[in-house]
Amino acid sequence: MDPRILDRLRCPVCGEPLAEATAGTSNALRCPRRHSFDIARQGYVNLLAGRAPHAGDSAEMVAARADVLTAGHYDLISAALSDAATEAAGRPRATPDLEAYPLVVDAGAGTGRYLGAVLAALPDAVGLALDVSKPALRRAARAHPRAAAALADTWQRLPLADASTAVLLNVFAPRNGPEFHRVLDPAGVLLVVTPDTDHLAELVDVLDLLRVDPDKADRVAASLGGHFTPVSSAVHRAELALTRPEVATLVGMGPSAWHTDPAALATRLAALPEPARVTVAVRLDVLRPR
């Protein structure tokens, strides 16, 4: 593992620094108290303290997400995050090491696509993808040459040192306000992406998909308000023209995949016009630690 990333990691059990195991093999990380964490052959390290509460996105959901992202359908998110991270990178850091090599952490990284885009825009930065889904981490571990990946539950204590992170990404993922605040440098930035109210609106009724909570923005603010100060908020939109198979893949990558009957979905998909016009609408909130 890149030592610039390893330096920021902490044992999820005791909080001590981690180092590569030196006895016999280097396919594990270990702390001074001898808590040991295996590095999978696919490249990610398991930094869970105990069992995961759930398995996260399935292999099928992750494959669908990879197809959608590779096709460029969500490139507006990558662009918005890269622009915001680049703007934030010019601010002085409270933690000296972050001046030389800022750490970008994606909490709930999925395939690591967004982390890779931000690292491409920040040539001096290194990155860490955190997720609870092993199929996602197998891809995230290869997302960028300056990135590493770790199995971690964002609801628990994050396996990172205090004030170790310059930029924290949170895209369509759970938000742990106290932990995000702890690991962010005081001059760092939190970039939160959530669906806006008209995200995929053309498909919701026709395909019986989950609706975006109309109070989503308020719930995001409530979950972070005690720890962060809003800097800016902007909605980014694009209109896609999708084939029916592309629509099916789009549905299969998101939360509706857990709640949609495949046979009923196939019937509804067959009734869609082709190409189907679909709105992508997301909100990017930029926040700083209080």
Image: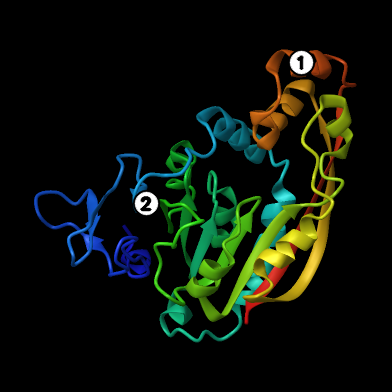
Q: Position of residue 77 (x, y in %)?
A: 71, 53
Q: Secondary structure at mark 2?
A: loop
Quarter of the rendering containing residue 84: bottom right
Residue 109 — which label? none
Q: Position of residue 22 (x, y in %)?
A: 13, 58
Query: Is residue 13 shown left or right of residue 86?
Result: left
Residue type, label 1: Ala
For the N terminus, the quadrant is: bottom left
Query: Is residue 140 shown left or right of residue 200?
Result: left
Q: Residue drawn at (48%, 72%), measured in percent from left and top?
A: 183
Query: Is residue 15 shown left or right of residue 108?
Result: left
Looking at the image, is mark 2 or mark 1 earlier in the sequence?
A: 2
Q: Position of residue 160 (x, y in %)?
A: 41, 67
Residue picked out by circle 1: 264
Quarter of the rendering containing residue 10: bottom left
For the C terminus, the quadrant is: bottom right
Q: Secondary structure at mark 1?
A: helix
Q: Residue furthest left?
A: 24
Q: Residue drawn at (27%, 64%), measured in percent from left and top?
A: 18
Residue 122: tell me if it is visible.
no
Q: Residue drawn at (66%, 50%), measured in percent from left and top?
A: 172
Quarter of the rendering containing residue 57: top right
Query: Is residue 235 shown left or right of residue 2?
Result: right
Residue type, label 2: Leu
